[in-house]
Image (tube, rainbow, N blue to C red):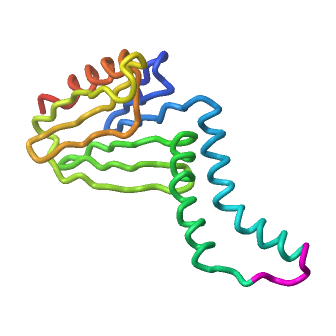
């Protein structure tokens, strides 16, 4: 049994024991910039090697450190690009803990939170510009705090906090 708000379906979904929050997609030019930077860092060194072979007829002496550095650095804009395109966080409420999985479609980060579901409080915190009215969810218990990465508009966040408080706050 899944309860999804029609107007907020693109931001969160709350089922029996699971909460899924989708990342807000930025404007197209921001995605384009991250895509361009990632492509330049990944493909730039390879294109330079191919161009050198094509013009001189021989393989260049490759600086392995420079090539490795560019590929490693490209990981960060690639990760941000994938988060903005496909990102979602899934919180699974188990009997004694909350499990968090950050999903980037092509890879996932799993994190288990070892705090109990008793006496949970749900709140939000503003992020970004005030006029955007975006917030992140904060889940607190006696044993720790979980702060979501995905932003949700204020109205949808208020509804999500109300639903979570009704379901989990008084267990």
Residue at position x 48%, y 17% from top?
A: 6
Residue farthest to the front, as pictured:
56
Q: Position of residue 72 (x, y in %)?
A: 54, 66
**Image check: 98 left or right of 14?**
left
In the picture shown, does residue 41 fall above or below 56?
above
Q: Residue at x 63, y 50 (%)?
A: 37
User: Is 23 in the magenta?
Assistant: no
> From the viewer's perspective, is residue 65 above or below residue 102?
below
What count of labels does the image hold?
0
Q: Locate the N terminus by quadrant.
A: top left
* Foreground residue among 162 and 56: 56
Left or right of 48: which side holds 26? left
**In the displayed structure image, the side of residue 145 where residue 153 appears, left or right:** right
Q: Residue at x 48, y 16 (%)?
A: 7
Residue 83 locus on image (x, y percent): 51, 44
Please tell me which residue is depicted at 25% across the width and 34% down the height of the picture.
138
Q: Which residues are magenta?
A: 55-60
**Between 104 and 170, which is closer to the camera in this rendering?**
104
Give residue 163's quadrant in the image.
Answer: top left
Query: Which quadrant of the figure has residue 153?
Result: top left
Q: Is residue 152 visible?
A: yes
- Looking at the rendered image, the quarter that the C terminus falls into is top left
Q: Quadrant of residue 93?
A: top left
Is 99 left or right of 43, judged from the image as shown? left
In the displayed structure, would residue 81 be above or below residue 55?
above
Asked whether the viewer can see residue 1, the reply is no
Across and down, in percent, residue 166 comes to: 21, 22
Question: x%, y% of residue 111?
Answer: 32, 55
Q: Main secondary structure of the magenta part?
A: loop
Q: Nearer the viewer, residue 48 or 12?
A: 48
């Amino acid at each position: 049994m899944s309860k999804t708000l029609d107007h907020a379906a693109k931001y969160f979904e709350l089922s029996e024991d699971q909460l899924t929050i989708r990342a807000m997609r930025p404007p197209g030019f921001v995605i384009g910039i991250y895509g361009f930077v990632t492509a330049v860092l990944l493909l730039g060194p390879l294109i330079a090697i191919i161009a050198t072979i094509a013009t001189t007829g021989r393989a260049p002496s490759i600086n392995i450190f420079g090539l490795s550095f560019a590929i490693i650095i490209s990981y960060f804009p690639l990760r941000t690009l994938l988060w903005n395109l496909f990102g979602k966080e899934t919180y699974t409420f188990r009997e004694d803990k909350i499990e968090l999985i950050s999903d980037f479609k092509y890879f996932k980060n799993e994190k288990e939170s070892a705090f109990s579901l008793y006496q949970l409080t749900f709140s939000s915190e503003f992020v970004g510009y005030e006029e955007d009215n975006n917030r992140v969810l904060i889940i607190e218990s006696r044993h720790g705090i979980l702060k979501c990465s995905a932003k949700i508009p204020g109205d949808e966040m208020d509804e999500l906090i109300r639903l979570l408080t009704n379901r989990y706050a008084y267990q």
